[in-house]
Image (cartoon, grey):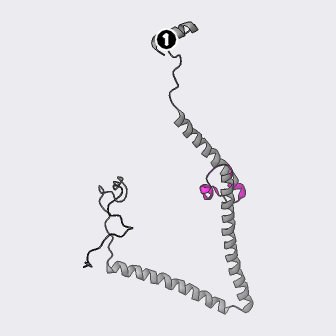
Amino acid sequence: MDDPTKTEPTPSEPTEPTEPPVPPTPGKPGDPTEPPAPEQKFTQTDIDKAVAAAVKAAKEGWDRERSEAERLAKLSKEEREKEQFRIDREKFDADRAALDREMLVNEAAKQLRAVGVSDNFAELVCGKDAEETKANIDAFTKDWNAAIEEAVNTRLKGKPPKTGGGTPPGASMADVIKNSITQGF
């Protein structure tokens, strides 16, 4: 009979680990040499304070909305239309500014790719307008290329090969051949 308390591994669960576990790196989370972070515990008063703060913030928001609605209700039809136009205009301007910023970031990414730099830096080099962004890209690519060149030169440094090969200066070809034969190439 089948024992309902006994479970067998499913095909997706390995029965044996395929690779040994990697020891944690010191200073990283999960490092056994570091004490575990204390578990944060909340008392009922902490929870009450948090709930009260959230309720207070929500009430303030509702009060602002209600007072704005009351203010608009007191205005004449013409004033309400002007106020609504002003509100709509502010929202439009905010949306337009966000769109302009996104377009500027996309253009910066395109320019960075054109000069061979990762477009991950687009947000970083983006300025207030296209001219400032272009100047930022130029300065960034100059510094970027200088840093890459320095890193490459550092890695390529090494000892120069020894010259001479053991042949004395002024030796004739016959002497070189004679030396090669006696030394066994």
User: How many discs appear?
Assistant: 1
Q: Residue furthest front?
A: 1
Q: Residue furthest right?
A: 78
- In the rendered image, residue 55, in percent from the top left (x then y), is placed at 45, 84
**Image vertical order of residue 131 relative to residue 153, above or below:** below
Q: Nearer the viewer, residue 14 or 158?
A: 14
User: Label 1 neighbourhood size at 10 Å, few (<14), some (14-19), many (20+)?
Assistant: few
Asked if residue 120 is among those painted magenta in the image, a careful observer would answer: yes
- In the rendered image, residue 166, in percent from the top left (x then y), is placed at 49, 14
- In the rendered image, residue 130, in percent from the top left (x then y), is placed at 71, 58
Q: Residue at x 49, y 11 (%)?
A: 181
Q: Nearer the viewer, residue 133 or 165?
A: 165
- Let me know if residue 133 appears in the view: yes
Question: Which residue has dot 1 on it?
Answer: 181
**Image vertical order of residue 12 relative to residue 172, above or below:** below
Q: Nearer the viewer, residue 67 or 176?
A: 176
Asked if residue 112 is among those painted magenta in the image, a careful observer would answer: no
Instruction: Identify the image quadrant of the N terminus.
Output: bottom left
Q: Residue at x 60, y 41 (%)?
A: 146
Residue 46 is drawn in which quadrant? bottom left
Q: Which residues are magenta?
A: 114-133
Q: Amino acid at mark 1?
A: Ile
Residue 49 is drawn in which quadrant? bottom left
Q: Residue at x 50, y 85 (%)?
A: 59
- Let me know if residue 171 appears in the view: no
For label 1, the SS is helix
Main SS class of the magenta portion in the image: helix
Q: Is residue 52 left or right of residue 149?
A: left
- In the rendered image, residue 164, in percent from the top left (x then y), is placed at 53, 16
Q: Residue at x 67, y 77 (%)?
A: 91
Q: Is residue 28 left or right of residue 71?
A: left
